[in-house]
Image (spheres, grey):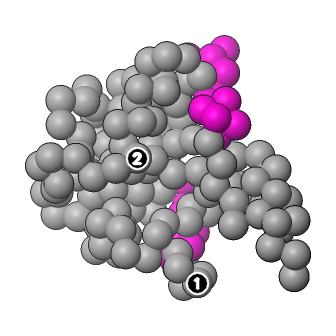
């Protein structure tokens, strides 16, 4: 296989940028993710892919719930996404001083998100170095219906391989 062509092709896929919220017991966490897609209208299902060795994976495995926070293409949105890319101190409280609420699943729903939805895990699949979660959407909210969601390309990042 032509490795350069493979990397270029995969980098040309269009990706949004999201903050995935997770919860297990009393512990909450958030992480930046870009592999998110709707897979079914009825029932409403969404797939996310999380690195196998991530702390978020442990929380989703334990709690069987996650949220997807959709972030605006703005300076504030870029700051939110950048905050959740790497582990923060303290490691187990990545939300820090972030303003958020919770709803049906107890996962974090960011005040800075333009919209969000929360899911209960219905299926998992190990996919190479990531874990794929299929979640049934059980709650949703919109804070800015006319805002433009942030994308990987707009951040100047790529995540192909």
Q: Position of residue 21 (x, y in %)?
A: 37, 49
Residue at the spot 77% in from the left edge and 46% down from the top edge: 14
Above or below residue 62? Residue 158 is above
The residue beneath circle 1 is 128
Q: Position of residue 79 (x, y in %)?
A: 41, 26
Q: Is residue 107 left or right of residue 25?
A: right
Residue 139 is a magenta residue: yes
Quarter of the view holding residue 136: bottom right
Sequence-wise, the earlier of marks 1 and 2 is 2
Q: Which residues are magenta?
A: 131-156
Quadrant for the C terminus in the image: bottom right
| Mark 2 burial class by Cα count in 10 Å: few <14, some 14-19, many 20+ | few
Above or below residue 23? Residue 104 is above
Is there CB contact under 8 Å for labels 1 and 2?
no
Residue at the spot 37% in from the left edge and 75% down from the top edge: 53
Residue at the spot 36% in from the left edge and 68% down from the top edge: 54
């Amino acid at each position: 296989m032509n490795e350069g062509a493979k990397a270029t092709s995969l980098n040309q896929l269009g990706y949004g940028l999201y903050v995935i919220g997770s919860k297990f017991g009393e512990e909450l966490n958030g992480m930046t993710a870009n592999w998110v897609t709707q897979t079914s209208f009825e029932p409403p299902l969404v797939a996310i892919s999380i690195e196998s060795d991530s702390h978020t994976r442990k929380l989703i495995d334990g709690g069987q719930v996650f949220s997807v926070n959709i972030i605006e293409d703005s300076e504030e949105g870029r700051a939110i996404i950048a905050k959740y890319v790497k582990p923060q101190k303290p490691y187990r409280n990545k939300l820090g001083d972030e303003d958020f609420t919770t709803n049906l699943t107890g996962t974090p729903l960011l005040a800075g998100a333009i919209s969000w939805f929360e899911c209960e895990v219905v299926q998992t699949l190990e996919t190479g170095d990531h874990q794929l979660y299929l979640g049934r959407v059980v709650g949703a909210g919109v804070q800015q219906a006319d805002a433009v969601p942030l994308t990987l390309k707009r951040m100047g990042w790529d995540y192909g391989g």
